[in-house]
Image (tube, grey):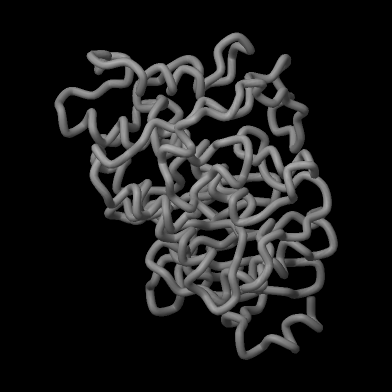
Amino acid sequence: MEIFISNHGNLAPKRFKYSEIKKMTNSFLEKLGQGSYGSVYKGKLPDGELVAVKLLSKGTGEGEDFINEVASIGRTSHVNIVTLIGFCIEGKQRALMYEFMPNGSLDKFLRGDGHHLSWNTLFEITQGIARGLEYLHQGSNTRIVHFDIKPHNILLDEEFVPKISDFGLAKLWKNKESIVSVKGARGTVGYMAPEVFFNNLGGASHKSDVYSFGMMVLEMTGAHKNNTATKGNSSDSYFPDWIYKQIETTGNRGDYGVTNDEEEKLARKMMMISLWCIQYDPSDRPSISKVVEMLEGSFESLVVPPKRFWSSPTTQPPQGSSTSVMQSSSIERASTIQAVGEDFS
């Protein structure tokens, strides 16, 4: 890690001493959250700016996640990407300092514990995440595949502007390469694309992020109504199947919690685009730039995607598991793909 920092000093954010980190967080007094990587604490810079400090666990490997974070997010600058302000390497202590997001992560608004977002806000969050991913895939000097897009890694500022965070699993992606080299499954169960599991699908790529984005947005649409299929309680009820029924059926507003025509269009647009994103074959998925175009375009211009995505798992994976063997759909490729007549690659 020290060699990396010395070689990339001009690209890396500011380096802080551990004593400075401890002082800024008032000895880690206020915890904002916790994950497998460690804990996040609220802090304050000397000028009064609030920050979030991620203190990495001492058992988080040899530093690959830390280097990934500094190497990838340290090079980015976009309204929908969280800003990495600084970092700390001192002995076995490692910490990352980000801008503070007062509304926390998106996942707390999808758990059905009293928080609620309007369809308009959900749609704006969806657009913001897509634009952030588009920047990572195409807008920065070094393209980046995130590999862990999920609600927990989407932070919301005071105006609910979404910012993609946690680049510990990210991979830098050379401009002329379509396939990204990864070792083993990479990501979170429920959001990982099938090609991350099955090499016969051509390998992981930027389309793997598109899949994760699609699954996350489907979760956003279902969580609005707290449909039981979003909770993973039953192997008999597969969430994308439930969503597909919503876009095939008219006059079912109550099923997903819309109250007027405008909300219904936003909800159905999110559902339809998301189902395109989770197509089993990566070549059938749109690029994230195409997703942005679809979100900004009219609902009437959208075509219903083929029902060609993973079937429900025969058994539910253990919570927190990093891999799962799932059945692939046996449904033949629908003729709708040809009807779209557009290059999604």
Would you place residue 90 above or below residue 315 in this image? below
Q: Position of residue 332 (x, y in %)?
A: 61, 24
Would you place residue 331 above or below residue 107 in this image? above
Residue 328 relative to residue 260: left or right: right
Quarter assignment of residue 264: top left
Quarter assignment of residue 192: top right
Q: Nearer the viewer, residue 21 or 26?
A: 21
Residue 250 relative to residue 107: left or right: left
Q: How many marks?
A: 0
Report the quarter where the N terminus lies.
bottom right
Q: Nearer the viewer, residue 226 or 258?
A: 258
The residue that appears at 16% across and 33% down in the rendered structure is: 262
The residue that appears at 60% across and 66% down in the rendered structure is: 144
Q: Position of residue 247 (x, y in %)?
A: 35, 23
Given the current orientation, which residue lies at the most extreme top position?
236
Q: Nearer the viewer, residue 309 or 237?
A: 309
Q: Position of residue 14 (x, y in %)?
A: 58, 82
Report the quarter where the C terminus lies.
bottom right
The residue that appears at 30% across and 55% down in the rendered structure is: 158
Would you place residue 294 above or below residue 135 in this image? above
Residue 236 relative to residue 104: left or right: right
Q: Position of residue 183 (x, y in %)?
A: 83, 53
Quarter assignment of residue 163: bottom left
Q: Nearer the viewer, residue 185 or 121?
A: 185
Would you place residue 24 above or below residue 316 in this image? below
The residue that appears at 57% across and 80% down in the rendered structure is: 13
